[in-house]
């Protein structure tokens, strides 16, 4: 699970990010609202966003509103010293999923993150599909038609990422960020290698690959209709 923390105070950001890493969450930090919005518009995605209200370049409520114009699904928890009722109501009305006033207990923050991610998974459903290809997130099983196949943990994450972005052109940098959790290094071919692994397992003989290579762009997972019954 990957978390984006939008927080400009270095001490607070370091405390939260280190704690989340220790709890098993890969954490990226953006010090300014504009930086976070640019990364989101560039195609990066996270499982959950922690958003501070008091940012140096723009109000956190404005950042929240802009995120929600393009993304209605990613859970957002606001972290702020403004614990008054009007501020909490404003944040929730603008689309925040939870609102945690500072100072807070770190264990409570982690519990709220778990609750939001659990709810998000329930809302999304446990099976992702593209035509006759199915990925069962709970059972960690993959199948196409009546053929089941084994995936490594990384292959599973890569296929999940593709299925959640069907029809979209995804750059290698976006895939690296979404699946591996680090910035793009032009010298690595790890994405191409794992796409090859995945193709060998999910594609049917003598048919076009479900994962299309887009020249100069990256990859696109073909949008496929389910077979007629």
Image: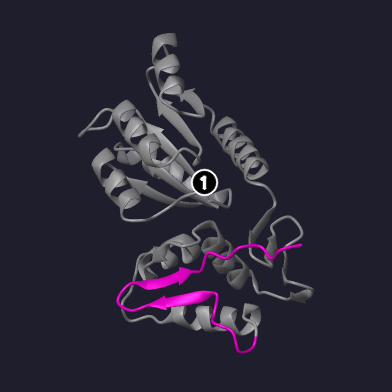
- What residue is drawn where x is 31% and y is 34%? 63
Q: Please, what secondary structure does the residue beneath circle 1 have?
A: helix
Specify start and end residues of the magenta stretch as a single range: 205-229
Please state which of residues 8 and 2 is positioned toward the viewer in this rendering. Answer: 2
Location of residue 145 in the rendering, given as x and y in whole percent from the top left corner: 74, 72
Dominant SS of magenta comes to loop
Location of residue 27 in the rendering, given as x and y in whole percent from the top left corner: 45, 51
Say few, some or many: other residues with alpha carbon within 10 Å of mark 1 (under 14 / 14 to 19 / 20 or more): some
Q: Does 83 sit above or below residue 1?
A: above
- Colour scheme of this structure image? one colour
Q: Does 199 sit above or below residue 58?
A: below
- What residue is drawn where x is 35% and y is 65%? 183
Disc 1: which residue = 20
| Left or right, 209 with reference to 36 | right
Please state which of residues 224 and 71 is positioned toward the viewer in this rendering. Answer: 224
State which quarter of the image contains the C terminus: bottom right
- What residue is drawn where x is 39% and y is 15%? 87
Please state which of residues 111 and 178 is positioned toward the viewer in this rendering. Answer: 178
* Residue 153 found in image quarter: bottom right
| Left or right, 123 with reference to 85 | right
| Left or right, 10 with reference to 201 | left
Membership of 14 in magenta stretch = no
Please state which of residues 176 and 26 is positioned toward the viewer in this rendering. Answer: 176
Location of residue 171 in the rendering, given as x and y in whole percent from the top left corner: 36, 68
Furthest residue in direction bottom, as rendered: 206
Q: Does 52 sit above or below residue 200?
A: above
């Amino acid at each position: 699970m990957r978390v984006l923390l939008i927080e400009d105070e270095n001490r607070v950001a370091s405390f939260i990010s280190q704690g989340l890493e220790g709890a098993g969450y890969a954490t990226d930090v953006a010090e300014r609202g504009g930086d976070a919005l640019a990364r989101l518009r560039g195609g990066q995605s996270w499982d959950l966003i922690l958003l501070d209200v008091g940012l140096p370049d723009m109000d956190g409520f404005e950042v929240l509103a802009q995120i929600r114009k393009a993304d209605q699904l990613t859970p957002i928890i606001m972290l702020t010293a403004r614990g008054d009722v009007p501020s909490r109501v404003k944040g929730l009305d603008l689309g925040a999923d939870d609102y945690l006033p500072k100072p807070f207990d770190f264990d409570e923050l982690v519990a709220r993150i778990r609750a939001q991610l659990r709810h998000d998974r329930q809302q999304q459903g446990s099976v992702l599909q593209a035509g006759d290809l199915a990925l069962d997130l709970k059972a960690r099983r993959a199948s196409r038609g009546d053929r089941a196949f084994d995936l490594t943990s990384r292959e599973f994450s890569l296929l999940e990422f593709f299925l959640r972005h069907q029809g979209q052109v995804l750059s290698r940098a976006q895939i690296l960020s979404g699946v591996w959790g680090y910035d793009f290094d032009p010298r690595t071919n790890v994405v191409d290698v794992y796409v090859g692994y995945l193709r060998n397992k999910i594609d049917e003989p003598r048919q076009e690959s479900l994962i299309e290579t887009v020249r100069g762009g990256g990859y696109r997972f073909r949008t496929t209709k389910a077979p007629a019954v």
